[in-house]
C-alpha cells in the first residue's frame, strides 16, 4: 500500500511539473519558434529529444553557446530564470513525440 501511495504521489507531482512546463513553454517564447508540439522548424524541431538533452541545450544557450542562431535563442533562453523552470520546460518538451 505504501508503494502504491508513493507511486501515485510521484505521478501527480510529475503531472504538476509537466503542467508548469507547459505554461512556461507557452509564455517564455518557446512555442513561437518550435510550435505547439515541437515540430515547427523555424530553427529546429525539438520533438523526440530527451529531458537531459533539452536541459543541456537551454543551459548552453544561456551560456552563449549554441551555434549561429544563439543570438536569436538567447533572449528566450534567459527568460527561464531558475533550474526548476528549465527542468519543468524540459520535462514538458520531452513529452513531444
Image (cartoon, grey):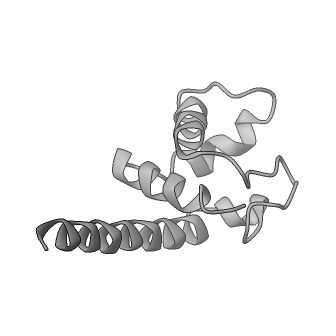
Q: With respect to residue 91, does 5 lie above or below?
A: below
Q: Position of residue 7 (x, y in %)?
A: 27, 67
Q: Report whether 44 appears left or right of 15.
A: right
- x%, y% of residue 32? 74, 65
Residue 37 falls in image quadrant: bottom right
Most foreground residue, 74 or 96: 96
Count of numbered marks? 0
Spot the residue most to the right.
41
Is residue 80 shown above or below 38? above
Q: Residue furthest left?
A: 2
User: In which quadrant is the N terminus drawn?
Assistant: bottom left
Indicate left or right for 2 with 47 as reference. left
Q: Give the position of the C terminus as an image quadrant.
A: bottom right
Quarter of the view holding residue 13:
bottom left
Residue at x 59%, y 37% (from the top left corner): 53
Q: Quadrant of residue 47?
A: bottom right
x and y percentages locating residue 27 in the rendered image: 56, 70
Give the residue drawn at x 67%, y 46%: 49
Work out whether residue 71 or residue 32 is closer to the camera in this orientation and state it.
32
Q: Residue at x 28, y 65 (%)?
A: 10
Against 44, residue 22 (above or below) is: below
At horizontal 46% and vertical 67% (from top left) the residue drawn is: 18
Amino acid at each position: 500500500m505504501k508503494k502504491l501511495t508513493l507511486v501515485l504521489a510521484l505521478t501527480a507531482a510529475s503531472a504538476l511539473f509537466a503542467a508548469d512546463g507547459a505554461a512556461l513553454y507557452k509564455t517564455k517564447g518557446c512555442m513561437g519558434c518550435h510550435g505547439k508540439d515541437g515540430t515547427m522548424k523555424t530553427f529546429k524541431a525539438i520533438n523526440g529529444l530527451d529531458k537531459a538533452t533539452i536541459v543541456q541545450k537551454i543551459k548552453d544557450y544561456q551560456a552563449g553557446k549554441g551555434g549561429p542562431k544563439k543570438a536569436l535563442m538567447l533572449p528566450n533562453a534567459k527568460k527561464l530564470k531558475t533550474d526548476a523552470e528549465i527542468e519543468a520546460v524540459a520535462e514538458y518538451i520531452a513529452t513531444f513525440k
